[in-house]
Image: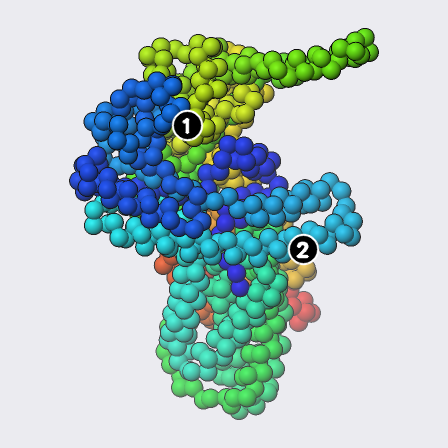
């Protein structure tokens, strides 16, 4: 079984923004690098600190896959002391150059529009090292070839060779990605080992996308181990306390473990990757499998008390016969709830749905084959009559609704109304940093970069030249008239190369002035941290012109004579090769508690559209802020679509099972209550919808409906005895109510174990689902029987009618 926590697994499928993001990365460089924050215990520009920083940089650069390491030791300095353009052609001064004045260098680094609040903090206490990995051409080629065929598949049917090629590329890309992730994890561990050697002289934090992916892989591995072992240990203790017999611990766990091994084996066999969302499948599978076994155990023990001298074969047969139909429908409805997740556009959510559908099917088959077969090998055991605490609890609920039924309904109605109001506060806006505990390195690194180095989450604003500038008219065909001079004019045109200030829309005095206005607007936004663009580079380079604005002749000379190394650092990341596209690189404050990504993106688009000589068609936004916002906005749409699908499917299932639309309508109400209460709680506590909590409502309904089916099924059986609705309620509470109580307690305890995760959305998922199960049990033991008594949806038994 393989894990996949890559960035590709967390973005929307077929997202046009993702394609554009990759295209911009290919042109200007990827943001797939590591950031190391370095806060020395002594002053940053003291010799001991610089020596340690140099040693750290050299150690990092020696790693095989590292292409370069950028630090304050390596960036060009043009005011320490001031140099001319001709000086730069000879040598680019850096902090390590003998000619550089360290006092002036410190001043330049702290005041430079390029380096301040970017490479070094404003107070000079923290600096950053950027670790760039070598470009992996094999990975890019495989991904691009696979994506090209996938895109073609959306618009037309692939032929046999293309289908086979797509299958081969998909498999090869999976294998290569796994190897690459393992290699990145190894590199990051090597980097951490290097950092450990310098922690006595500085406070160091590691950040960046590759590090986040690696740490989240560790979180998933940790969660699978902890959840699996935790569920086994705690639920084993719970079953021991409830049933007090070894067989009722061993048999359920045997069934659950076999189901788990089968699903894990299947995932490994078909190379189905487990993601951050589906990593909970093992704990959930154990919980569901145990809940099925508990229903069988409770029914077996009921029959054992009624038929003290019955043979084991009879007890097992009757147990299976009486529970197979309601359990079949409970499993089917739960499968429907998980299957509804495939309506999402988010690959991890889709995979989670399918994995649980397969797991539930296997669990049901084993619960009604392996469990009874193993039970047949054992003999009935006589039990001493013990005090029935569970019966007293369920009996108390029966007496409560008999005496205070109208009050219970009124309280439920008021609570539902309040929760419906609270649901209006539900939001998908959340901070990525809040997904992690404050003790994790991910949180600490992002927080430090946010507060000291100008923000963390990248957002690129791309401004194209107007279409009237780039749409060149078709050249006249002079060859027809001047055939003999065509070669001469071609040679003359090749010799006379116009300056970039002429051919470029942006790299001239007018274009740069307009770029400066755009830069100032973006920099003025409260949410934006550091903004880098061609304007910051020009602001720095105008020192070469004695601080004066650069005119077109100087710009043309600068572009032609600037050293390639300097051009790659200051110009190329922000200006396309033809000079007709600008890139403004923003970093957004991820730790800002008021951050609203969608509102920020709309504000930027609206602000730029209102600027003179900039139209909406010229502007494109990209980067992780855009991709993450698309993901979050899709979550809200998925929530509505998923809930609608689940409720409709369950209503159909109820109608088929009970053969009555009236009973189905009554039975679905407790499940609506559970969903509204959990969503209302999320809204009241300002818990946002994210990639994990988006699944809570659908899953809660799918699980909660199990108790509803078992109760209504048993209620109908009890009603046939005497036709007395109130008596049927008491008998149902005393029989199936006991099994509902046990299974719900098991599920609540099982989901609560998820709170041990280091991933905050997983903690919310576990605790909120446990809450939903608790409210569903209360609704099934109170509201459901009340409605059954009031509505009387069942037909009267034949002997009463006669």
Residue at image location 52% in from the left, 40% down from the top:
631
Q: Which residue is mark 2?
A: 168
Residue 140 is situated, as x and y percent measured from the top left of the image, at 57, 45
Residue at image location 52% in from the left, 69% down from the top:
260
Residue 31 shows in this picture: yes
* Residue sitting nearer the eye, 450 or 419: 450
In the rendered structure, the answer to whether residue 489 lies left or right of residue 51 reads right
Residue 485 is situated, as x and y percent measured from the top left of the image, at 76, 10
Is the residue 256 above or below the residue 516 in the image? below
Is the residue 759 above or below the residue 574 in the image? below
Q: Quadrant of residue 562?
A: top left
Residue 665 is situated, as x and y percent measured from the top left of the image, at 60, 52
Number of marks drawn? 2
Residue 647 shows in this picture: no
The label on residue 139 is: none
* Residue sitting nearer the eye, 223 or 529: 529
Q: Which residue is mark 1?
A: 566
Q: Element under label 2? A: helix
Residue 243 is situated, as x and y percent measured from the top left of the image, at 42, 78
Residue at image location 57% in from the left, 57% down from the top:
175
Q: Element under label 1? A: helix
In the rendered structure, the answer to whether residue 543 lies left or right of residue 613 reads left
* Residue sitting nearer the eye, 30 or 772: 30
Residue at image location 47% in from the left, 57% down from the top:
182
The mark that comes first in sequence, 1 or 2, is: 2
Question: Gap in Å between the C-alphas at discs 1 and 2?
Answer: 43 Å
Quadrant containing the C terminus in the rendered view: bottom right
Dot 2: few (<14), some (14–19), or many (≥20) neighbours within 10 Å?
few
Is the residue 795 above or below the residue 61 in the image? below
């Amino acid at each position: 079984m393989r894990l996949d926590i890559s960035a590709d697994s967390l973005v929307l499928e077929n997202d046009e923004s993702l394609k554009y993001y990759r295209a911009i990365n290919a042109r200007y460089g990827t943001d797939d690098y590591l950031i190391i924050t370095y806060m020395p215990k002594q002053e940053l520009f003291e010799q001991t600190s610089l020596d340690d920083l140099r040693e750290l940089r050299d150690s990092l650069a020696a790693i095989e896959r590292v292409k370069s390491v950028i630090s304050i030791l390596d960036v060009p300095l043009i005011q320490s002391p001031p140099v001319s353009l001709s000086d730069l052609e000879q040598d680019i001064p850096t902090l390590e150059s003998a000619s550089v004045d360290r006092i002036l260098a410190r001043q330049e680094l702290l005041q430079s529009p390029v380096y301040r609040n970017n490479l070094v903090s404003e107070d000079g206490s923290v600096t950053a090292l950027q670790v760039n990995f070598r470009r992996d051409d094999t990975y890019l080629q495989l991904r691009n070839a696979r994506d090209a065929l996938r895109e073609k598949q959306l618009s037309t049917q692939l032929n046999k060779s293309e289908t086979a090629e797509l299958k081969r590329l998909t498999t090869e890309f999976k294998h290569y990605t796994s190897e690459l992730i393992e290699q990145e994890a190894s590199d990051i561990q090597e980097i951490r080992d290097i950092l450990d050697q310098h922690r006595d002289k500085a406070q160091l934090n590691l950040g960046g996308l590759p590090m986040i992916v690696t740490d989240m892989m560790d979180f998933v591995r940790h969660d699978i181990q902890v959840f699996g072992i935790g569920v086994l240990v705690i639920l084993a203790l719970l079953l021991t306390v409830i049933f007090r017999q070894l067989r009722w611990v061993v048999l359920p766990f045997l069934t659950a473990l076999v189901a788990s091994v089968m699903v894990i084996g299947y995932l490994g066999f078909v190379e189905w990757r487990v993601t951050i969302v589906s990593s909970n499948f093992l704990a959930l599978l154990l919980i569901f499998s145990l809940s099925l076994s508990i229903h069988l155990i409770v029914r077996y023990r009921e029959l054992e008390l009624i038929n003290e001298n019955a043979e084991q074969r009879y007890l097992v047969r009757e147990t299976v016969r009486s529970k197979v139909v309601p359990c079949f429908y409970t499993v089917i409805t739960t499968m429907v709830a998980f299957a509804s997740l495939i309506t999402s556009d988010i690959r991890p959510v889709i995979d989670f749905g399918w994995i649980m559908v397969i797991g539930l099917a296997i669990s049901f088959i084993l619960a009604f084959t392996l469990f009874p077969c193993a039970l047949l090998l054992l003999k009935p055991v006589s039990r001493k009559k013990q005090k029935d605490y569970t019966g007293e609890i369920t009996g108390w609920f029966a007496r409560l609704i008999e005496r205070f039924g109208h009050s219970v309904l009124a309280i439920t109605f008021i609570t539902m109304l309040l929760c419906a109001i609270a649901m209006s506060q539900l939001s998908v806006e959340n901070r990525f940093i809040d997904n992690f505990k404050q003790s994790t390195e991910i949180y600490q690194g992002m927080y430090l970069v946010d507060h000291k180095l100008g923000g963390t989450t990248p957002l690129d604003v791309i401004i194209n030249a107007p279409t009237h500038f780039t749409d060149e008219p078709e050249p006249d065909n002079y060859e027809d008239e001047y055939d003999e001079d065509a070669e001469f004019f071609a040679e003359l045109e090749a010799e006379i190369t116009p300056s970039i200030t002429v051919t470029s829309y942006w790299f001239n005095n007018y274009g740069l002035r307009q770029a400066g206005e755009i830069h100032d607007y973006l920099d003025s936004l409260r949410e934006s941290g550091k903004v880098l663009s061609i304007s910051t580079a020009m602001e720095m380079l105008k020192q070469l012109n004695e601080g004066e604005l650069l005119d077109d002749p100087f710009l043309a000379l600068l572009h032609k004579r600037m050293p390639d190394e300097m051009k790659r650092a200051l110009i190329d990341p922000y200006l396309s090769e033809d000079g007709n596209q600008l890139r403004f690189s923003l970093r957004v404050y991820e730790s800002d508690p008021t951050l609203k990504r969608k509102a920020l993106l709309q504000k930027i688009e609206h602000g730029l559209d209102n600027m003179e000589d900039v139209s909406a068609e010229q502007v494109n936004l990209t980067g992780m802020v855009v991709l993450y916002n698309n993901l979050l906005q899709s979550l809200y749409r998925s929530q509505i679509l998923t809930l609608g699908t689940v409720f409709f499917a369950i209503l159909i299932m109820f109608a088929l099972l009970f053969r009555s639309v009236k009973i189905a309508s009554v039975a679905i109400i407790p499940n609506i209550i559970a969903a509204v209460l959990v969503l209302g709680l999320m809204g009241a506590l300002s818990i946002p919808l994210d990639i994990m909590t988006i699944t809570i409502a659908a899953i809660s309904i799918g699980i909660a409906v199990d108790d509803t089916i078992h109760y209504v099924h048993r209620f109908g059986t009890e009603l046939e005895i005497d036709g007395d609705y109130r008596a049927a309620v008491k008998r149902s509470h005393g029989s199936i109510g006991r099994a509902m109580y046990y299974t719900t307690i098991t599920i609540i305890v099982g989901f609560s174990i998820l709170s041990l995760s280091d991933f905050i959305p997983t903690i919310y998922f576990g605790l909120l689902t446990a809450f939903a199960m608790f409210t569903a049990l209360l609704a099934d033991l109170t509201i459901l029987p009340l409605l059954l008594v009031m509505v009387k949806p069942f037909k009267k038994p034949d002997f009463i009618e006669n």
